[in-house]
Image (cartoon, rainbow, N blue to C red):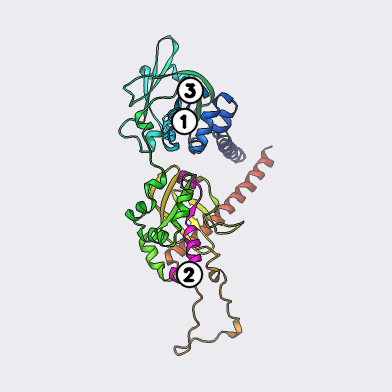
Amino acid sequence: MQLSRSLTGAIFLTFALGLLLSSTTNAHNITKILAKHPEFSTFNHYLTITHLADEINRRETITVCAVDNAGMSDLLSKHLTVYAMKNVLSLHILLDYFGAKKLHQITNGTALAATMFQATGAAPGSTGFVNVTDLKGGKVGFGAEDNDGKLDATFVKSLQEIPYNISVIQISKILPSPEAEAPTPAPNELNLTSIMSKKGCKVFSDMLIATGAIDTFYDNADGGLTVFCPLDSVITDFAPKYKNLTAEKKVSLLLYHGIPVYESMPMLKSNNGLMNTLATDGANKYDFTVQNDGEVVTLKTKIVTARIVGTLIDEQPLAVYTINKVLLPRELFKAALTPAPAPAPEAEAPKDADSPTAPEPFAPDSEPEDQTASDQNGSVRSKGGILVAVVLSVWLGAFMSVVF
């Protein structure tokens, strides 16, 4: 029995240490990696302003084909917009791991690697792929698939490798690609209200236009913007409460549905916690909490919990998601935060069919029974998880004292 317990405890301890090590070794930061090499400062700078650095840091099994400052000068001379620049640099981020050793041992001597440009959906057909070929004389060539099969660049050296998480290598020059360099419209040219109107958020879009709040959304589009758009049916049910707000409060409510940073779905799933909004003005003002349970992402205010139910567009630096409830900030609906006091036991009297019924407390957004139950179950699950963690901790401590 003692041996069995010891063996079980050893297995558990090994598993826990494995999880800890994997969580610490997989992390990488492309900005810090390239900062060690000043000759790549221009490439590093544009990874940051195009938000590609964030995407690289979130992914695993990835290869960054960096170009030095001299090589970047050719690209800068084309005077591309920042959105076209993003597409070009996306072509230099391979969604596979290619360390120096693997580059010289490619199966059949050549490989077609998917890139982040292909993953965005902006590259038609196979134009977002890069040909990687092992050449004579120990060289490795790279070429964009839509550039007539030309291998325009060659492998220079490895900058840093974290097998098989990220490989940062230097190639000799920027990969030419007509598709990647093609003019790309800015987010405000995409017509945000048109996107929402055509995909189930017309009422919310009309409110943005009517109040002038849309201007604030567009002002933030270039630097990064995420919009949480209530579906038409949800807004329609909320309309009577919306009409009772002053003009200023209507604007605040609408701005509460946008955040001034780009958040892809993977980012929302990993960056749980408080989030400032376009309506935020000072500490702890007009914020909400992002939470996720597996694939489900929720936005929780002090009054209501909404769930993300769809994606209208997710293309850096703009993301628009649909939600199943209107987000209600505490700053506008404080009445719902103060529950009616419970009657004293001695004041209770038997209910009579003819006796008047006390008015129900004000609730700005009624919760369906199944949603309320879900919230309560979530709370129970959360407490249960904490209890399990405490029990495991105590058990592990006891095991350590017995074994060692």
Earlier in the chain: of badge 3 and badge 1, it is 1
Q: Is residue 57 visible to us here?
A: no
Mark 3 and mark 2 lie on one chain; the one further toward the N terminus is 3
Amino acid of disc 1: Ile
**Number of the front mark, 3 or 1:** 3
In this figure, which residue is indicated by the disc labeled 3?
Answer: 71
Query: Is residue 104 rendered magenta in the image?
Result: no
Return the residue found at the far top.
Answer: 137
Range of residues picked out in magenta: 242-269
Q: What numbered label is drawn on residue 62?
A: 1
Left or right, 87 with respect to 334, comes to left
Q: Position of residue 130 (x, y in %)?
A: 38, 26
In the image, is residue 245 part of the stretch drawn in magenta?
yes
Can you tell which quarter of the image residue 110 is in?
Answer: top left
**Looking at the figure, which quarter contains the C terminus?**
top right
Look at mark 2 in the image and give the residue it sits on.
245
Where does the N terminus fall, quadrant-wise?
A: top right
Q: Is residue 126 left or right of residue 105?
A: left
Residue 291 relative to residue 404: left or right: left
C-alpha gap between disc 1 and disc 2? 49 Å
Residue name at image x 32 percent, y 30 percent: 126
How far apart marks 3 and 2 lie (CA) works out to: 56 Å
Q: Amino acid at mark 3?
A: Gly
Residue 166 to residue 285: above or below:
above
